[in-house]
Amino acid sequence: MIRSFEDDTPVVPDSAFVSEAAYVVGDVTLGEKSSIWPFVCIRGDIGPTTVGDRSNVQDHSMLHEADIGDGVTLGHNVTVDQARVEDDCLVGIGSSVLRNAVIGEGSIVAAGAVVREGQEVPEDSLAYGVPAETRKLSDEMREQIPMYAQSYVDNRERWREAGGFDIRD
């Protein structure tokens, strides 16, 4: 469901895919070729939430007043609450990125990690554990990040071509 809240209506480009089982409300802007999967909640009721071009937000994730860059993959059951994830990042299944945290460009947050309030993960880093610690990301791991984002750009197109419910009808 896509709905307005007070004076704000989500901006959803024609190239985006939003599952009919997702909830997108208020001051939300989605990027070109982005994808929002079932049971995702994206709230822009207190401040804006953005999801960049070619980024994907997978099932059961929640974004609230979040800034998600381009080419980002947010795995299943991820929470990003009042935080920023810069371009070309992967945030693993079940991770939490808390208020005022910043995930630097080209980084990976490991599955189940908790990035603390106000924590800054340097670019090209791996954040892991509870609370998250960081180390330099290997070149091999860094090179794989765009592959994940592209796989969801491709999957978005498959779902759009399959037809069925269209949020713009």
Image (cartoon, rainbow, N blue to C red):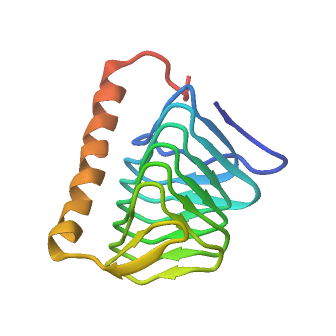
Q: Which residue is drawn at 36% across and 53% down?
A: 54
Q: x%, y% of residue 105?
A: 38, 76
Judged left or right of residue 118, residue 13 is left
Q: In this view, does 33 lie above or below 133?
A: above
Where is residue 154, by image quadrant?
Answer: top left
Percent position of residue 72, x then y: 39, 59
Q: Can you tell which quarter of the image residue 71 is in?
A: bottom left
Please report the residue visible at 75 percent of the width from the left and 41 percent of the height from the top: 4
In the rendered image, the residue lying farthest to the front is 130
| 113 versus 123 height, above or below | above
Labels in figure, total: 0
Front residue of 142/67: it is: 142
- Picture quarter with the C terminus: top right
Outermost residue toward the right? 6
**Image quarter in which the N terminus is found:** top right
Q: Is residue 104 visible?
A: no
In the foreground, 127 or 129: 129
User: Extreme left residue here?
Assistant: 140
Q: Residue 97 at what x, y percent from top left?
A: 57, 64
Q: Who is closer to the viewer here, 160 or 57?
A: 57
Q: Name above or below for residue 165 compared with residue 123.
A: above
Left or right, 10 with reference to 84: right
Please indicate, yes or no, whether residue 166 appears anywhere in the rendered image: yes
